[in-house]
Amino acid sequence: MTYFIDRRPNAKHKSAVNRQRFLERYRKHIKRSVEEAVNRRSITDMERGEKISIPTKDISEPVFQHGPGGARSIVSPGNKEFVQGDRIRRPGGQGGGNGAGEGGASNQGEGNDEFAFTLTREEFLEFVFDGLELPHLQRKPLKSLEEVRMVRAGLSRDGVPARISITRSMREAYARRIAMRAPIKRALLEAQKALEDEERKDPVLRNPARIVELKAEIERLEKRIEAVPFIDTYDLRYHQLSAQPQPSSQAVMFCVMDVSGSMTQNHKDIAKRFFLLLYMFLEKHYEKVELVFVRHHTAAREVSEEEFFYSRETGGTIVSSALKLVNTIIQARYPPEKWNLYVAQASDGDNWDDDSHTCRDMLIKQLMPQLQYYAYVEITPHDHQSLWHEYESVAGHFPERFAMRQIVEASDIYCVFRELFKRRLSQAD
């Protein structure tokens, strides 16, 4: 007889644990469905859950069953088409029904529909941003004394029960018991030896009063030893905590969007969806990230979050105005020695005459030496514009910290976003 015992630990909330196991087991199928859901959602519809379907054939579980047992001889016919491990294709439908599906109607047979379940908002976003991170994030020197971490700083005789050090308290109690009992035990050994010597004497020379006195002394000393407490309040030791300043991994993300007249409404919607995805990613995974929103046409302005996504302002195109503003803000508020600096730019690539050369020179000489990462997204269904060709030169100077991708239609947004912010091998640890 063979027994199979499931020794996997279960928490109090068994259903929650089982759900997490299920999500982990079918992660590949769920992630594919999540990617499809992201591509078909609107800008304002990203923060809700999603109904996921998995084909029944993909959730079949292994089962154990008794074999026929014994020795058997089987003669199997050969074949010319299949070998072990081949998957036999299901035959096509050949019915005469008028329905939309393949095959015909039948008065027998049964099957199972796809398995469907709903992801919560948190689970949905977890799959959306799985494996993503800000590239080259570094710990910077301390900005202020506000960012501290409580660390152990030795032991104290006073404290709360939650911070008691059991090991050190027991050690102190053991040392105290040894110290208090040592002289009593020495006196006890002396009294016991004296009693033995007195009892060994000849009955004529033995002193009964002395024997009674020694026995009383031995009893008194034994009681004193037993009276020493196992642990005393004097023995208790507590972990002491102190606030230790910590290096800051704070970062700032500059979101730069082109709102010039060459950007059609469709282009702007795609750019907004890209930045909304970026905004949600930063809000979910990072606490110390600030966002600076910059819109530009012929002139650039720092705007609020609401104005960035919903303002209808437009005009000509001078991209360098946005880069100059970003550099000015960095110098005024975000010194590179204290902040991790990131820029994400979305544009259709169209720019005014020789301004693209100005953008290239500004990036190479001023901005890129200060930045951790620069992500440029060109939203255009046709050939690349002048800005893209100039930015290729920047990417050649900074191959690890400057990334460029093209978005043709809305369905490309999520794939491009994952390529730009995927976890690097050097940061996986």
Image: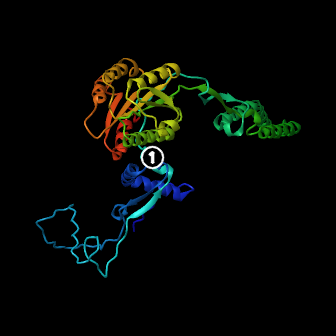
Q: Is residue 371 visible?
A: no
Residue nearer the viewer, 408 or 225: 408
Residue nearer the viewer, 261 or 115: 261
Vertical placement of 380 versus 390: above or below?
A: below
Rendered residue at 10%/66% (across/down): 80
Rendered residue at 32%/31% (across/down): 350
Residue nearer the viewer, 327 or 347: 347
Mark 1 residue crowding within 10 angstroms, few (<14) / some (14–19) / many (20+)? some
Please say which color scheme the image uses: rainbow
Vertical placement of 421 versus 325: above or below?
A: below
Residue 33 in the image: state x and y as whole percent.
Answer: 38, 54
Residue 321 in the image: state x and y as whole percent.
Answer: 41, 24
Rendered residue at 49%/24% (across/down): 339
Q: List the residue tagged with mark 1.
A: 43
Helix, strand or loop at label 1? It is: loop
Residue extending furthest toward the bottom: 107
Amino acid type at image mark 1? Ile
Residue extending furthest toward the left: 80
Residue extending furthest toward the right: 209
Vertical placement of 313 versus 28: above or below?
A: above
Residue nearer the viewer, 155 or 319: 319
Rendered residue at 43%/34% (across/down): 314
Vertical placement of 243 versus 101: above or below?
A: above
Give the quadrant of the N terminus: bottom left
Q: Quadrant of residue 395?
A: top left
Q: Quadrant of residue 160?
A: top right
Residue 377 in the image: state x and y as whole percent.
Answer: 35, 35
